[in-house]
Image: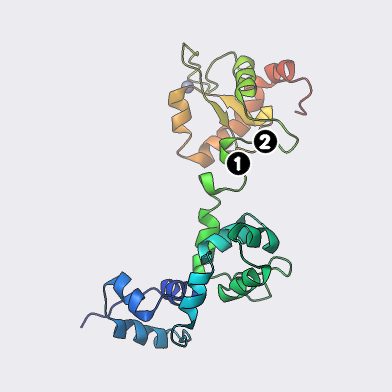
Amino acid sequence: MRKIIINRDFLIKKYSNENKSANDVAGMLGINEQTVRRRLVEFNIPRRRGGAGLKSSRKINIDCNQLFQAYSIEKKTVREVARIVKVSEDTIHQRLREFNIPRRKTGLQKGQKLSLFHRQQMSNSKKGSNNPQWQGGVSYEPYGIEFNKELKEQIRKRDGYACQILDCKKRENGRKFPVHHCDYNKKNNHPENLITLCHSCHSKTNMNRNYWQEYFKDNLRNISKTNLIQEFPDAKV
Ligand SMILES: [Zn+2]
């Protein structure tokens, strides 16, 4: 007989954190409730007393994901989260405990580990548009250089409106060239981290990121240092 495999983190998330019933979880997985109950025992997941959890999850309009995102990733305070969700701070404290979300002030206790679920979430949320530093695509240098039209145009001008890949050197013709963040950090808008590429070379930099990062590290200074100083006399190069 085939043993039905249920991921433990999934079960904890649904049953313990989101207060779904064993029956609900069984429905999601298309298996019978009995199997879910057996796994709860096997995984040592404490059983809930009937119904109590459901009530509180209906009452409080925040789930584990949202709370983790707001509190652990976006670093909002308990008070801020409480205001957003329109519940008391006590409720948020209680939820943090229920969801096993590590408290910020004390940090992770020695030996306490984030669940796989939280670790994945932490790493997912650092990618792309979830990154708290992303700021909706508008980025700021630590000391305030904004990655805007003006800056991009300055970079293109500095680079002679030409692709800065040595064996490309294509020149802009009608359609503006993209300005690339050499270290892939959209927040780092220091002119030294920005470089003009043609569309075709720019799309190549989406792959083999390590290669390109090294490439620019080695070449950028030679490519545009003189122009950089002319164009950005105040930049610390
Ligand atoms: Zn090119």
Q: Percent position (x, y) of residue 70? A: 60, 58
Task: Specify the farthest residue to the top.
Answer: 173
Give the left or right position of residue 58, taking residue 104 as reference: left
Amino acid marked by disc 1: Gln
User: Going 49% across and 20% down the picture, which residue do you hit?
Assistant: 167
- Which mark lies nearer to you, 1 or 2? 1
Residue in the image at 63% along x and 29% along y? 147
Crowdedness near tag 2: few (<14), some (14–19) or many (≥20) residues, C-alpha within 10 Å: some
Q: Is residue 116 above or below residue 35?
A: above
Left or right, 52 with respect to 32, comes to right
Query: Which residue position holds label 2?
Result: 140
User: Please, is residue 172 above or below residue 122 in the view?
Assistant: above
| Tag of residue 135 | 1
Circle 2 SS class: loop
Say which label, 1 or 2, has the lower sequence index.
1
Disc 1 element: helix
Residue extending furthest left? 1
In the rendering, at what x and y percent does residue 137 appear? Answer: 56, 37
CA neighbours of label 1 inside 10 A, class few (<14), some (14 to 19), many (20+): few
Q: Observer-nearest residue: 199 or 146?
A: 146
Q: Quadrant of residue 220?
A: top right
Residue 167 is tagged as: none
Residue 78: x percent and y percent?
A: 68, 63
Label 1–label 2 contact, CB within 8 A:
yes
Label 1 and label 2: CA atoms lie apart by 9 Å
User: Which residue is rendered at x = 37% and y = 80% of the image?
Assistant: 22
Which of the 4 image quarters holds residue 103? bottom right
